[in-house]
Image (tube, rainbow, N blue to C red):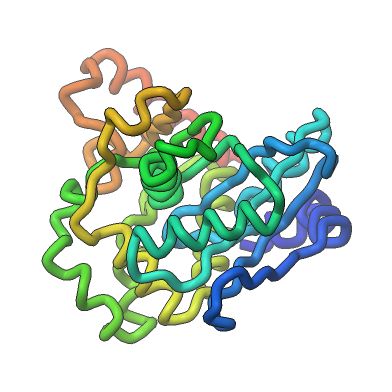
Amino acid sequence: MEEIRVSPDYNWFRSTVPLKRIIVDDDDSKVWSLYDAGPKTIRCPIIFLPPVSGTAEVFFQQILALTGWGYRVISLQYPVYWDLLEFCDGFRKLLDHLQLDKVHLFGASLGGFLAQKFAEVTHKSPRVHSLILCNSFSDTSIFNQTWTANSFWLMPAFMLKKIVLGNFAKGPVDPKMADAIDFMVDRLESLNQSELASRLTLNCQNSYVEPHKIKDVAVTIMDIHLRQFHGTRYAAINPAMVSAEELEVQQSSLNNCRESDDES
């Protein structure tokens, strides 16, 4: 965990990019937390929406890299919303507050689903220029949890964290991936019960994206496969999609990495 938290890049990010807190709803408890970096003259920035376990900080490396190329990047953390339409309305108000007519949205997992729903809800008066979806989904039924979506608000924080951590990898991984997972787990600890419960509710309540309403939006799909987890419950892909030869090469590569680590 300490690798990323004490890294020069992370410390530079924290010392140079201020965290802003913005209220756009009548409810003062709904606070959007965000990092806004890069030229403010750019009126169509890229906005990063985190997964259930993420905070605005988890995209700090993307912020540093993209702003170095002259892009304006906004990474945000959601307030507590229990309904998808409520979230979309709050996000629209945030864009209005920031005086942004159109944006590019990058969403990871839940963030990608929320980005699609916002594009769907605003399709008659488009606010989304493009979508970049990383390991996301368009139908919550894939989780088979719609029947429990209305119960998350009753669960204590430790139980909610256990649900989220159940989706984190625990097998052998690349050292950089292990550091990233530890960093995400650390960020998860900073979220309170209401934040976790509301995100899981949005993630699992019965809903899907109506494709005809976002057909005019440019979409880029990033599907990151952690193949070292193949054959485990953490596998990111269908085993039938990978040939036996490819699995053998992957296993051999993983074994070599382990031997190198042991020797060092």
| Rendering coords of residue 17 (x, y %) | 82, 56
- Work out whether residue 236 or residue 62 is closer to the camera in this orientation and state it: 62
Image quarter of the C terminus: top right
Q: Total marks drawn?
A: 0
Residue 87 in percent (x, y) is at: 43, 61
The residue nearer to you, when weighing 189 against 217, is: 217
**In the image, is residue 122 above or below residue 69?**
below
Residue visible at 28% across and 41% down in the picture: 209
Q: In the displayed structure, does residue 105 sit left or right of residue 138? A: right
- Image spot of residue 144 (x, y percent): 14, 55
Q: Is residue 199 left or right of residue 201?
A: right
| Rendered image quadrant of residue 61 | top right
Q: Is residue 219 visible?
A: no
Q: Residue at x 42, y 33 (%)?
A: 224
Determine the residue positioned at 56% across, 34% down: 260
Nearest the eye: 44 or 9 = 44
**45, above or below 250, in the image:** below
Q: Is residue 34 visible?
A: yes
Left-right relation of 2 to 148? right
Q: Quadrant of residue 39?
A: top right
Residue 178 place in picture, x, y as percent: 52, 50
Q: Quadrant of the N terminus?
A: bottom right
Residue occupying image coordinates x 49% and y 32%: 132
Q: Nearer the viewer, residue 264 or 207?
A: 207
The reply, left or right, for residue 187 in relation to residue 234 is right
Residue 251 occupies which quadrant of the picture? Answer: top left
